[in-house]
Amino acid sequence: TGTSQSLFFMHDLSPGSAFFLPHGARVYARLQHFIRNQYWNRGYDEVVSPNIFNSDLFKISGHYQKYEKDMFWIQSQSGEEFGLKPMNCPGHCLMFRNKNRSHRDLPMRLADFGVRSSSASCREYQIHFF
């Protein structure tokens, strides 16, 4: 339906990713606006997290062991391994850990429109509770 209405198209050179055309981008923006209003009304705060992390973060969180084969990896010239995030939770854990917190700070309700990448996923919206 989206392709026949010229809202978006897909391409083999970027598997699992939509190219939103002008009308599709407007629909996408309206949906984001609607969702933002919904989570603001429900006490969520929007955050933006990076798309790439050192593999150590995924090893600490357990995501490396579970999702390594489904993730996209980049090797730096110095030999460090970095991965494109397949989900938002490891980055949100770093946000939570960024400062000392008390039990009074909980629950934290974070919402992130960030792009997530894996061989099994596409652009999605994800929220987290802490």
Image (tube, helix red, strand yellow):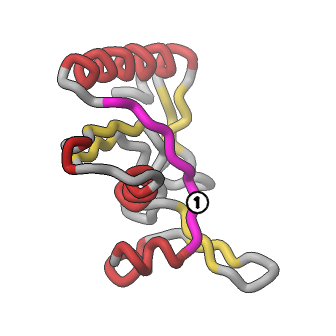
Left or right of 56, for residue 88: left
From what the image shows, is residue 81 above or below residue 48?
Answer: below
Between 7 and 47, the residue placed more toward the observer is 47
Residue projecting furthest to the right: 77
Quadrant of the image containing the N terminus: top left
Q: Amino acid at mark 1?
A: Ile
Q: Which residues are magenta?
A: 45-54
At 41% from the left and 57% from the top, the residue drawn is 97
Overall secondary structure of the magenta section: strand
At 38% from the left and 22% from the top, the residue drawn is 32
From what the image shows, is residue 34 above or below residue 11?
Answer: above
Left or right of 85, for residue 112: left
Residue 94 in percent (x, y) is at: 44, 58
Q: Quadrant of residue 37?
A: top left
At 18% from the left and 23% from the top, the residue drawn is 42
Callout 1: SS: strand
Mark 1 crowdedness (10 Å alpha carbons): few <14, some 14-19, many ≥20: some
Residue 105 in percent (x, y) is at: 26, 42
User: In this figure, which residue is indicated by the disc labeled 1?
Assistant: 52
Q: Does residue 72 appear in the picture of this structure?
A: yes
Q: Is residue 20 magenta?
A: no
